[in-house]
Amino acid sequence: NIETLLSSAVSAGTTDVTMVFEGGQTYNLETISLPTGLSNVSFAGEPDGAGQKPILNLREVKLDAPVIGKFLFENVDLRGADINTFLVNLASDGISIDTYAFVSCRITNFRSAIRLGNNALKVGSIVFDDCQVANMGGYGVVNTAGSTPVIDSITFKNSTLTELSTQLMDVRNPVKQITIASCTFYNRQVAMTQLLRLDTKTLPQSLTTSANIFSGNNSGGSINATSFDPASTALQISFGGSFRTNELTIDKYEFTDIGVFGGTAEDLFIDAQG
């Protein structure tokens, strides 16, 4: 029982905990509550000889600890039990996490990878690096419910994101820096309404994108880069250095400065749906 092991570790004075899972194995973890007293916690996979990551079947990770430094998932295949469930839902005052990160992970079938309620809580950085994210519910991979939480930065880099429903993120609080770099987006079975849903009253201080690809027919639906007209705000948004395939239909708000590839995702990728 993981919760018992974690509680025993904390009681013994070990607060920096890494849980290691073997590649090629499936772990039915359901819901895990992280106890108070952890300073750092990692879910780490050791891929097997064929490069297979461990599969973690999860419904939710709950956080009892008010303060955590590093909260990391690395080299694991995270599979949600219910697309209507948030992997991590922070909804209490006083919670603080320095870094919440996914590195070289596959993440599927959650409503969001993280949701912050409209509470007095703080997350330093939220990072997705070298990940495959697929079949996420309509709240966005990252979701905040109001203007109260504090987030220093949100970063998506070197990742592939497929079949996202509605949006990549829905962020209602001011964030110092949002970065989307070297990512590939592909939707064919479901539609995104917009890439970014942001509250115009609490826009990020800076939003940077670079070297991204937006592809697929978006299940026949039109898409906006943002949920608002960027020209009506002071936020500078450019998708220069990125491109989209020509089967993607824009609704009202284009990906400013983006290049258009003269073909479809099937023309661009060897196995677009693989």
Image: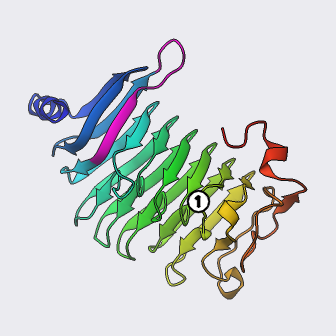
Task: Report which residue position mark 1 lands on.
Answer: 190
Residue 9 vs residue 258: left or right?
A: left
Identify which residue is drawn at 40% across, 48% down. 100
Does the stretch in magenta take in 57? yes
Residue occupying the far bottom of the picture? 232
Q: Which is nearer the eye, 56 or 239?
A: 56
Circle 1 SS class: loop
Question: x, y (%) of residue 74?
Answer: 44, 33
Q: Which is nearer the eye, 32 or 128?
A: 32
Identify which residue is drawn at 43% across, 32% down. 76
Does the stretch in magenta take in 35? no
Residue 193 vs residue 256: left or right?
A: left
Identify which residue is drawn at 21% across, 54% down. 66
Question: x, y (%) of residue 250?
Answer: 75, 72
Question: x, y (%) of residue 68?
Answer: 28, 47
Residue occupying the far top of the picture? 49
Q: Give the answer, above or below, for where 16 lies relative to 265.
A: above
Question: x, y (%) of residue 179?
Answer: 61, 57
What colour scheme governs how the chains and residues are painted in the rendered image of this protein? rainbow
Residue occupying the far right of the picture? 262
Look at label 1 and name its amino acid. Val
Residue 2 vs residue 211: left or right?
A: left
Q: Give the answer, above or below, for where 205 lies relative to 162.
A: below
Identify which residue is drawn at 29% across, 60% down. 90
Tell me where the magenta segment starts and ends, as one range: 47-60
Mark 1 burial class by Cα count in 10 Å: few <14, some 14-19, many 20+: some
Quadrant assignment for the C terminus: top right
Q: Is residue 204 visible?
A: no
Q: Give the answer, above or below, for where 207 lies relative to 38.
A: below
Q: Is residue 257 visible?
A: yes
